[in-house]
Amino acid sequence: LQLVESGGGLVQSGGSLKLSCGVSRSSFSLDYSSIGWFRQAPGKDREGISCISSGGGSIIYIDSVKGRFTISKDTLRNTVYLQMNNLKPEDTAVYHCAVIPSCLATPLPRSVLSSWGQGTQVTVSS
């Protein structure tokens, strides 16, 4: 199973972007899975930044994005979103989404249950 990310781009510091995470297999429902958003900046390890549980009852953010990013799940569209506001140059990275075992606390699980896709590039200029 591979998830498909989209919505990245180039924005100025303080700008906004909304990332989308869909599925390559239409028979798979994101509603029954915990989904995490991860990012990897050049020369750095991939880090989990936010997740939403299968029922949406648990939502987690790391401190550096708390108050700026919002994760949500659209059951009808089978899509998970990451609304990113007040973007900063340090948010520049390739963003990925993945199915994760659980969404309970930070750090997000390092092991994921879906294959990594190409991700979507987010570049924030100062």
Image (cartoon, rainbow, N blue to C red):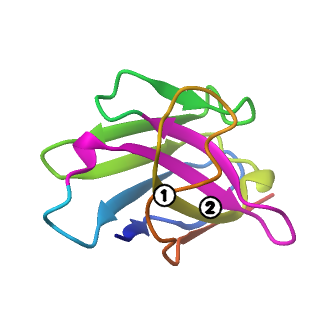
Specify start and end residues of the magenta stretch as a single range. Answer: 29-52
- Residue at 52% from the left image edge and 78% from the top image edge: 118
Q: Is residue 45 left or right of residue 93?
A: right
Three-letter amino acid code at the position of disc 1: Cys
Q: Is residue 16 left or right of residue 87?
A: left
- Residue at 17% from the left image edge and 52% from the top image edge: 77
Identify residue for label 1.
97
Q: Position of residue 54 (x, y in %)?
A: 32, 35
- Is 49 part of what is drawn in magenta? yes
Three-letter amino acid code at the position of disc 2: Val
Q: Label 1 to label 2, Cα distance in Å?
A: 20 Å
Q: At numbered mark 1, what does the secondary structure look like: helix, strand or loop?
A: strand
Quadrant position of residue 20: bottom left
- Is 104 part of what is drawn in magenta? no
Q: Position of residue 38 (x, y in %)?
A: 60, 54
Q: Is residue 92 left or right of residue 69?
A: right
Q: Residue furthest right?
A: 43
Identify residue for label 2.
11
Q: Position of residue 13 (x, y in %)?
A: 72, 51
- Is disc 2 surrounded by few (<14), some (14 to 19) or many (20+) residues within 10 Å? some
Which quadrant: the N terminus? bottom left
Q: Is residue 12 above or below residue 75?
A: below
The reply to whether residue 123 is visible in this rendering is no
**Total marks in image:** 2
Which quadrant: the C terminus? bottom right
**Which mark, residue 19?**
none
In front here: 31 or 90?
Answer: 31
